[in-house]
Image (cartoon, helix red, strand yellow):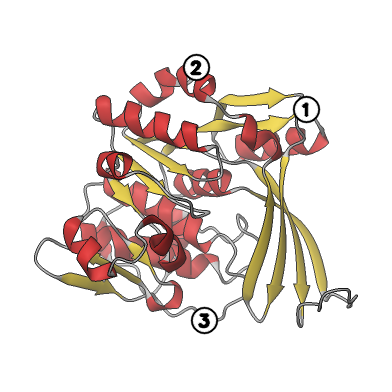
Amino acid sequence: MARITVVGSISTDFVVTVSRRPELGETIEGELFETNFGGKGANQAVAVARLGAKTNMVGAVGNDDFGDLLIANLIEEGISVENVERVTEQPSGAAFINIEANDNSIIYIPGANGEVTRDSVNRARAAFDQSDFVLIQNEVIQEVVEEVIAYCFENRIPILLNPAPGRPLGDGYINKVTYLTPNETEFSILFPDEKMEDVMKRYPNKLFVTLGAQGVKYHDGNEIVKVDAFEPQEIIDTTGAGDTFNGAFAVAITKKLSIKDCVEFANLAASLSIQKHGAQTGIPLLNEMKDSEYYEKKWNIE
């Protein structure tokens, strides 16, 4: 069984579904309110665990009731929390999500996630050393992202950076990551004023630009490849679809699938995830993937 370590945020999602967003100074009535487990790091860890990899989480939560629940949820998902720290300086992280017309906008409060430091990374080195793959996102501070990238590069551990939320990153670190998965907005922040096709050609089989319902684009060393998304039966909630994609992609990579098969497998997982409410509740189990009419037996993931 592959071992995957996820470094990133662990948060509570406060989700409001509305028919429209209020104007400045306006109060409107919402349609639905839910509290769900979230955080891009935790979402990706859950995706990895549900799809069959041994999963370790590196992160932090507050010393509060939300922190208790967040850790209990990870344990219930079969994720190791040995490297999840409890901090007293900050409350557990939170995200406030507005869902309108099956799309979302998010306000993210880092809280304890901002207390993940280089020391946290150093304390978790044993987990990195035992890992077949590492996942990290931008919901931890920049120096942590850079430290993890540098450590994985030096120790030849494959690493995927999901650069969300978007912020600049030096070419030196981009060159050290094994896989990079921005959406179009994040791409424009990483590579301002550059044509997407030119950058893809510069980073073949490394840079994967996710395009939502339009699928994923990358360069395979010969040409630009576009892998279409799978059409869901219905779209309920797109929150967490990108995290599901990244977790599924990581699992597929550790199974030695071809790059295109990895993208297709991840696209299917993302498509299934948006058919339920909540970032984590929609993430499919491997058996649910296999039950899909789109599942390819050639993927051979157990």
Q: Which mark is residue 123?
A: 2
Q: Disc 2 vs disc 3: which is toward the camera?
A: 2
Three-letter amino acid code of the residue under disc 1 = Asn
> Pointer 1: what residue?
63
For mark 3, what is the residue?
233
Q: Name the secondary structure under disc 1.
A: loop
Horizontally, residue 290 falls left or right of residue 155, namely right
Residue 242 lies, in percent from the top left, at: 48, 60
Residue 113's x, y, as percent? 63, 36
The amino acid type, in three-letter code, at marker 2 is Arg
Residue ID at (63%, 24%): 85
Q: Is residue 32 left or right of residue 124?
A: right
Taking the spot 49% from the left edge, 55% from the top edge, the residue there is 166
Going from the N terminus, do you reach mark 3 or mark 1 first? 1
| Residue 78 seen in the current view | yes
Name which residue type carries label 3: Gln
> Is the residue 251 above or below the residue 99 in the image?
above
Front residue of this view, candidates 249 and 187: 187
Helix, strand or loop for disc 3: loop
Q: In the picture shown, does residue 232 fall above or below 72?
A: below
In the image, residue 128 sits, relative to residue 66, either above or below, namely above
